[in-house]
Image (cartoon, helix red, strand yellow):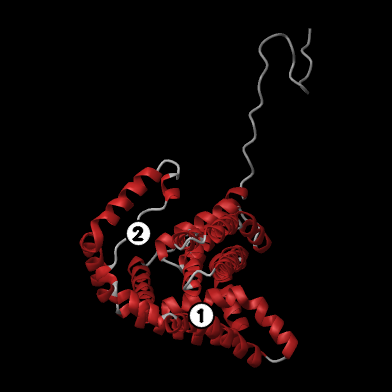
Amino acid sequence: MNTRPTVDLARVLLVIVILSALMVGSLYILRPFLPGLIWATTIVVATWPVLLAIQQRFGGRRWAATAMMLLILLFVIVLPLYQVISTLAEHGGAITAAVKSLPEYALLAPPGWVSAIPLAGPRIAQEWQTLSDAGAGGLLARLEPYLTIAAHWLLSHAAIVGVFVMHMLITIVIAGILYSQGEMASDFVKRFANRLAGPRGVAAVRLAGAAVRAVALGIVVTAVVQSVLGGVGLWIAGVPAAGILTALMVMLCLAQLGPFLPMLGGVIWLFQNDMKVAAILLLVWAVLVAMLDNLLRPMLIKRGVNLSLLLILSGVLGGMFAFGIVGLFIGPVILAVTSTLVNAWIEEVPPPVEPLEIPEATGAALPGAPAEKA
């Protein structure tokens, strides 16, 4: 008679406690590098086909990885800083004069078209006129509480700039390592997933990579295209600080808020300076650019992965609210992998068979049943 083997419960619990402590300790040690690791992994997975194309054209992984790191450094750090510094230098005199004139600044009366805005137009025009009638002292008195809150917030979050720069440098270094050793990292992740969940785990890893590329194509490319088109419109219309407004449009488009608000600011500035034709044309252009994502984003996402667009967009918005900007990529990956695993688990069991309905006693025999003897 076979006896059931005894389980050493204390040993099992001790192993679980030790493994949990090692995992928690490792994550705590790597905590300063986790944001950079997540961003670097996202960037490398999304741009891996570009790396392979550069490697095939010029030969050598080292040259391709160096080129990709320089591109990341250029587009993530150098160009934004150069744009901000050049814009401040170009309009430094105007900014200084505007700051000096703030105590004497009085808001202009609202233009006539503000009252014609449906629903909220009369209320906006009334509040605008109230601020205009208050003069410089009244306007500063109304704005002082908000300016004080903003100043306190900026002082309390001044260290964020240094942390951001450190995370960017860590991201670039880790991205360079992943570019040069990408196959080894991918093989490790696949073997770990296979050990954890078999072929289904490997399929989940591939799906996660496809979801990251889909979001990079659908969200990031759409944001860049909309921001570039919006920035070109602002520059042609002659709106000052078009570079800063374009950078603001990039952030708003990544946050799924669209480029319309910065362009609307340019439209208001043109109206205030009696450039009505340019303002109307810029307003039409802003509406067209804002509507572009309804066409471009679904098309690009479907090219990257065959998943529900509602699931991808829900992951983008929910991930952004839960994890910040990096949640744009984490959210869709989590929802895509979860949805695929749940569907695969459901499909393992065949659908329930409908029960056979027995006819009522009308003298009719069931199909295939032997005939009743007389």
Task: Name which residue type carries label 2.
Answer: Leu
Query: Which quadrant of the rendered structure holds the C terminus?
Result: top right
Name the outermost residue toward the top. Answer: 374
**Numbered label attached to residue 76:** 1
Above or below: residue 231 compared with residue 272: below
| x and y percentages locating residue 175 in the rendered image | 53, 83
| x and y percentages locating residue 236 in the rendered image | 58, 69
Q: Secondary structure at mark 2?
A: loop
Task: Name which residue type carries label 1.
Answer: Val
- The image quadrant that residue 20 belongs to is bottom left
* Residue corresponding to mark 2: 108
| x and y percentages locating residue 215 in the rendered image | 57, 64
Q: Nearer the viewer, residue 95 or 347?
A: 95
Measured in 3D between alpha carbons, the distance from the residue under mark 2 to the one under mark 1, in whole angstroms, is 39 Å
**Numbered label attached to residue 188:** none
Q: Residue placed at 77% from the left, 22% from the top?
A: 367
Total labels: the figure holds 2
Q: Is residue 181 visible?
A: no
User: Mark 1: few, some, or many residues within 10 Å (few <14, many ≥20)?
Assistant: few
Above or below: residue 298 compared with residue 144: above
**Dot placed on the residue nearer the N-terminal end, 2 or 1:** 1
Instruction: Report the side of 246 relative to 203 (left or right).
Output: left
Q: Secondary structure at mark 1?
A: helix
Above or below: residue 329 compared with residue 125: below
- The image quadrant that residue 25 belongs to is bottom left
